[in-house]
Amino acid sequence: MANLTTNFIGIKSPNPFWLASAPPTDKEYNVVRAFKAGWGGVVWKTLGAEGPPVVNVNGPRYGAVWGADRRLLGLNNIELITDRPLEVNLREIKQVKRDWPDRALVVSLMVPCDEESWKAILRHVEDTEADGVELNFGCPHGMSERGMGSAVGQVPEYIEMVTRWVKSHSRMPCIVKLTPNIADIRKPAEAAKRGGADAVSLINTINSITSVNLDTFSPEPMIDGKGAHGGYCGPAVKPIALNMVAEIARSPETHGLPISGIGGVTTWRDAVEFMTLGAGTVQVCTAAMTYGFGIIKELTAGLSQYMDEKGFTSVDQLVGRAVPNITDWQYLNLNYVAKAKINQDLCISCGRCYAACEDTSHQAISMSPDRKFEVMDDECVACNLCVNVCPVADCITMEPMAKGSVDPRTGETVGDYANWTTHPNNPMAKAAE
C-alpha cells in the first residue's frame, strides 16, 4: 500500500489533502467533521485583527457557472474573512489541535499592513499550538478595498516586508498565499522567498463577475439590487492554477520553494497533476462545498491506487516529476509529427469532427455520402481539435509518424530537424544567423 503521509515544511499530516481557508474551515464543528471524514489537514478560515468586527452580507454570497448538465464549474464568492470573534476562533483552534494532534492545522491570517498588528496576532496564534500560519495575500474582494488581501499580494515589496515581520516575530512555519490577479506570478513568489517564507500556496481566487441578471441588470450574486466583483474558484480555474504552480516550480529564482497547490482540485487526478508540477500538498474548497467532506475517501483511495499501480511508495516521489518536461514554445521539437486517425468501429457519425475541421480549422476531414469520416493526411496539421470535440472517448487519436517517413502535407522527412531552435522557419534561428 502506498504511504500517503506528508511532511510539508515540517507540518505532518496523514495525507496531502487539506481543506483550504474558506467557509468549510470557519469553526470547530466543521473542522472536526472534516477530520472525522479523513482530511489530512485544514487551513482555518482567515482571522483578522482585534478591533471592529467584520460584517458579512446577509444575502447571497455566491454566484455560479454551470455546465450543460448543471454541474458546478465555478463559484464567485463575495464572503469576507471570518466574522466570528477572534477569541472564539483562537479557543476552538487550540481545542481542535489538542484533540487531533496528528492532523495539520494551519491558521490563515490577514491584518492591516503594519508590524505591530502582525506581531500581536502572531502571539495569539502561537498560544493555540497550531502547526503554522498562512498569510492571506490573495482575496480580491472586500478586504482588498481596505488595503489588505490582494492589495498587498500585488506588490512584491509588501509581500517581502510582511513576510519578514512574520518570520521575525514567530517560530511557526510561514506559508504565503499568492493572488493570481497579477501579471507574473513569479514576482510575488520571489518576494516571499526573499522575506523568508517557508512555502507558498496558490492560487487564491480570481477577480470576477460570473453573470448579470438580465431582468434587474445587476451582477450576481445580487444584494438589494446591486452586485460586486468577487473571487472565482472551482474546476474552471484549475488550468490557470496549474500553470502558475509550474511557473514557480521551474523558475531558477524559486526552484525548490515548497508549494501547496490550490485551484479546482476535485478528483485524485487533479491532485496528482498539481503534485507532479511541484505541489507537496493540495488544498480543496469548492469540491467539498459541492459534494461534502466525504469526497476525501475518493481522493485518498484514488491517489493510493494510482501510486500502487505506478510503483510509488511515497507522495514525495510524485512531487515535481513533470517539471523537467515543461519548456517554452520555442524549444518544442519539430522532429515530432502526428496525424489524426478515426476509429471507424467507434465512430457514431455525428459529424462534429468534420464540422469543426471544415469550418474552423484545416479542411482535413472528408465526409462520404453515407457519412463516413476520414482524415486526409496531406491536409492534417495535427491540431487536435477533432479529438477535443469528438463525444466518443478514444474514437479519434493522434498517431505519431515514424522518423524518416515523409509528411504528405509538407513533403519534409520527419526527423530532419533536431528541434525548433534550429529549424530554418524559426525567426529566432534566422536572427542568430
Image (cartoon, helix red, strand yellow):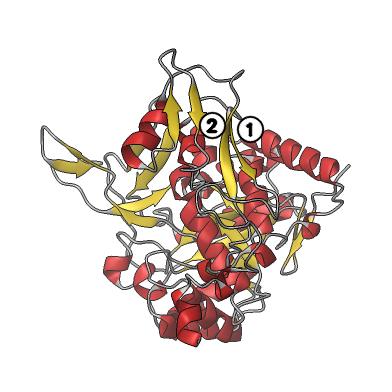
Q: Looking at the image, which residue is at 70% across and 63% down?
A: 320
Residue 70: x %, y % from top left: 39, 26
Can see residue 351?
yes
Q: What's the residue type where badge 1 is placed? A: Gly
State the residue in front, 173 or 184: 184
Judge from the rendering whether residue 82 lies leftward or rightward of residue 419; answer left or right: left
Q: Secondary structure at mark 1?
A: loop
- Check the image and report above or below for 6 versus 267: below
Judge from the rendering whether residue 22 lies leftward or rightward of residue 342; answer left or right: left
Q: Looking at the image, which residue is at 75% across and 36% down?
A: 301
- Check the image and report above or below for 281 versus 399: below
When asked about the image quadrant of residue 85, the answer is bottom left
Residue 183: x %, y % from top left: 38, 71
Q: Return the residue at label 1.
A: 294
Asked if disc 1 and disc 2 are in contact, CB closer than 8 Å, the reply is: yes
Cα separation, mark 1 vs mark 2, equals 7 Å
Q: Looking at the image, which residue is at 77% across and 53% down?
A: 102
Q: Residues within 10 Å of mark 1 (few under 14, many from 20)?
A: some
Q: What's the residue type where badge 2 is placed? A: Tyr
Q: Looking at the image, which residue is at 41% across and 71% down?
A: 111
Residue 309: x %, y % from top left: 83, 40
When asked about the image quadrant of residue 431, the answer is bottom left
Q: Secondary structure at mark 2?
A: helix
Q: Return the residue at label 2.
A: 291
